[in-house]
Image (cartoon, rainbow, N blue to C red):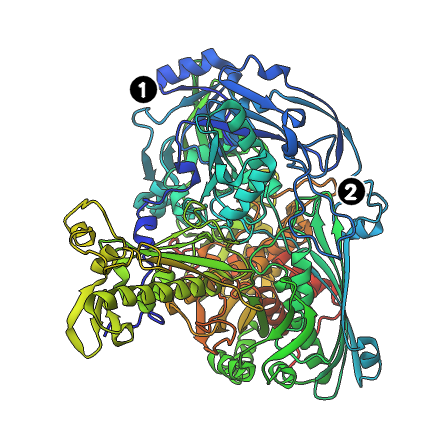
Amino acid sequence: MTTRMFGQSITRREDPRLVTGAGAYLDDLAPGVLAAAFVRSPHAHARIRDIDVAGTLDVPGVVAVWTHEDLPGAAAERLPMLLPHPSISSPHTGFALARDHVNHVGEPVAMVVAENRYIAEDACGRIEVDYELLPPVVGLPAAREAARAVHDETPDNVAAHHVQTVGDAAAAIDSAPHVLDLELEIERSACIPMEGKGVIARWNSEDRTMVVHSSTQTSTGLRAALAAKLGLALTDIEVITPDVGGAFGVKINHPWPEEVAVACAARALSTTVKWTEDRREHFISSAHERGQLQRVRVGFDDSGRIRGLDVQFWHDNGAYLPYGVICPLNTSTHVLGPYLVPDYRVEFWSMYTNTVIVTPYRGAGRPQGVYIMERTMDAIAERLGMDRTEVRMNNFVREFPHPLGVIMQDGAEGVLDSGDYVASMDKLRALVGWEDFVEFREQARAEGRRVGIGVACYVESTGAGPYEGGHIEVETSGRVNVFTGLTTQGQAHATVFAQIVADELGVPIDQVHVTTGDTRKMAYSVGTWGSRGAVMSGNAVHLAARKVKEKALAIAGDNLEVDPGDLEIVDGTVRVKGDPSASMPLSAVSVLSNPLRYAFDESAKAATQFARPPAPGAPPVTPGRAPGLEDQDFFSPVRSTFASGMHAAIVETDPDTADIRILRYCVVHDCGPMINPLVVEGQVHGGVAQGVGGALYERMAYDDMGQLLNASFMDFLMPFASEVPHIETDHLETPSPLNPLGIKGAGEAGTIPGTAVIAAAIEDAEGIPIRRMPISPSELWQLRRETADAPAPAAR
Amino acid sequence: MKPAPFTLHRPRTLAAALELLAELGPDAKVLAGGQSLVPVLNMRLAAPAHLVDITALPDVDRVESSGAGVTVGALATHRAVEHDAGAHEHQPLLRQALTHVAHPAIRNRGTVVGSLAHADPNGEMPMILALTEGHVRAVSSRGEREIPAAELFVGPLETCLEPDEILVSATFGAAGAGARTGFDELARRSGDYALAGVGMVLATDGDGAAETITGLSAGFVSVTDLPERLVLDEHVAGTPTAEAREVAEAVAAAVREHIDPIDDIHATADYRRHLAGVIARRTFTRLARTNDRPRTQEAHA
């Protein structure tokens, strides 16, 4: 028997190519084509009085200079609101090139197309824009105060306001034995993939078609968006995704202004135009996330069980709202976590500010929700003098399915479908040595050291619909091509989808070749986001492989003159069960699947009309069976499946310098059955690295005028390998009932509880409530000073 | 992030380089390792019309050490100095601090003398030149001059060099007999500019239990406008090294009194002031304690 590939920790098949420099990322493609560069607003809020491009005319090598008035048709209209939601009262989106107003530093105002990027940037420097400065709205307090507005039409700066209720939270809190109030804050961070955004648009004037390469998370989304903006028939535009150097959410929101402008220019100039985002552009003109102010009121009983929870928060969505309210919606629905909350009310306001737009970043609002609940759990434990894990255990949901009573980002009610939170907590306590920590703390204290431990639990809705598809074809060589429409930006899709197909089809994995993100190969797809790739396309290719297998068995059955039910496929050969001598290779089945007139090569002869005449009176192609050993299928789930996990961290804080070091970081992770445990580990490690970044290092330092002061890798402190702790992991595999493979998403899990668990550990070490994250040594030192007569860490 | 147009010159002799600089005047910048200048060009924070690349000049990459000091040629990289045994023997502060300068890939390209010409008060090398009372040798077509550290640095990112001058070498003072050196800093991430950093030279007399501190000087990273040398003898001289802890707080207090940090996005001025004191106290007590390994004590030993 072929070894089952599902569950094997095989190494990533894409790595030899990528780590030897043989990858082909966007900027590696089409060398020498025209380059675009953008004049961007240096002001956070201004009216454009005039744009003078005269100075560019004598720059040799400049091909075109565009401002808003040069954009044709729909391209001149506002960018689309991609995710309408009933809570959105003031939907504002920007233009491909600013018209009249700019609303954040970095907003594109003009585009230069030139022989190369150097010349394009030289010309950008000669364009003079006359701005009338307007006072900017920076930060949530200013947005809420609404002394001035980002958009005149929205004087209160409120883009969206949303309330969800389960039961009567206020009454439940009022009648609870204990009540706590918390004010929390979490700052902005951003995805910051190694490769920024980028697009190459190639207009073919002979057949008036466009081929676009984009560093994207959704080639089908970009295709539809550009077709609409350019007024092209969908069939006249294709989008291909090359190797993508990370995305983490920031490449999902299409079309970006630059993509519209570049595609228009390519068509107008009948040529190919490339734009590669540079690092500063990425900081000031792509997207950020995370920034929220939060207010919590919770009622609970003597054992720490929550009776009622009332949450309000304000979400900074930046200057425009193209991606709707997905992030705050996720926050509001993920507060509940793995806990039973009988009565819940959540209310949020999504606010405009004169800063870069906010779209999902790994976790997409969930880390903020987990931060709310986990800070609350620790506060309850502190109030009651209880062990923090015990309080959590007392609140865990123990029966599945568990309806949450709230509507999720996919429009369906959230239902915890599977998991075992008690078992997860037992594993975590064992992994980190929860019981032994008291002794460790005493020992450290005797040495003059300060240490603390924290724990944070989360659930994550993963694998949201609406659907993904798989198309599988077996070539006459026996090579198996797997096409799925979603994109790959560092995931191991070429490995894990091949594992699934190899199992179902019964072929060696080295025969299986996976192509993603190419609209020429699979036009129906949603994209790679929200920890959905494995669940959605994994199940789709699984279902497609099943159909191809059935087809192969039927064709082989005809030829071997046996019932297809008596056949199996092992190592790429169809054979009679129990009689391996009666067999034919899958390559031969592929030849026979396509009745031929011409023998193109030796193997094709077997399919020609004289070699294989049809049965008398029957057509060469069996009715109901299309030519070719190929088929496709789609997977569309009724709702998201919930992965879950728990993290524990031990930190040391320097009593003098307030430096913060992570001594241990433990993860218990449940994404159901793992297709490839090695890949899951990698996802967890990368996620934890970003979680640590968000907790201790990263922030977007805007000044009062809306200037981003740390728009470079010198001052935006993304953690290096030296700042990321060794990560200890353990896994639980509770299958989901919601898909054939029983799997759940794993992409974002590592990041989601990072801020919460580090805050908890620092609070434990310091004995000072931690309410604002991220936290730096300078801020911790300040906090110590503000906490009059700072107490010694409370014994727990 | 592409630089504005410039003309690149790559002279093969020092005389040719000096001639170019004399001719081009303030429109030219000297390029060596490029670890500070190239990012500045790419971000268009500067747009010199000419770059004079000195990496083809012969015989200026040497590191020569003696009891008189460590002389580092204009093209000696951070990494070369870090690994130079003679430099370490005669002025251990260099290696002690160089391990904190960015990352190995940057130290492989960046030059020590380039750091001095850049004159960043967040840099370790200017601080060590000041602390060891070193000097640099500047050459132009008009002649040659020796500039002491105390005169070289005139402001943040500002030196007294003329546009037609090239720094051909720097000489760091040697650690004297009986002197111990130490450097430590706290940075947000490994290789970042320090939130605060302190280099120290401790002088002692006598042996074992009778050993006494005779002098202490310190230099600072990221908490002063200019690289400089602070003499702390009055707080420590005459104290037996075994009792250094008794005066460590006075050292910290003197440091906090002397420095002049500012607020930025990574830390407040108050925090940096506090931190510099802590690092000074710790470095001082560490140096006093390690009397069995004179002059080779490493940062983070």
What residue lies at 78% left-to-right and 42% top-to-bottom?
A: A150
The residue nearer to you, when weighing A23 against A541, is: A541
| Residue A462 visible to an observer of this rendering | yes
| Residue B254 visible to an observer of this rendering | no
What residue lies at 22% left-to-right and 68% top-to-bottom?
A: A574
Same subunit: marks 1 and 2: no
Circle 2 sits in a helix, a strand or a loop, which is it? loop
Disc 2 sits on a residue from what chain?
A
Seen as rendered, the residue at the extreme front is A617
The residue nearer to you, when weighing B101 against A633, is: A633
Rendered location of residue B205, percent (x, y): 45, 55
Disc 1 sits on a residue from what chain?
B
Circle 1 sits in a helix, a strand or a loop, which is it? loop
**Label 2: which residue?**
A150
The residue nearer to you, when weighing A470 against A669, is: A470
Rendered location of residue B201, percent (x, y): 48, 49
What residue lies at 45% left-to-right and 77% top-to-bottom?
A: A733
The residue nearer to you, when weighing A210 against A608, is: A608
Label number found at residue B12 = 1
CA gap, disc 1 to disc 2?
58 Å
Rendered location of residue B128, percent (x, y): 48, 42
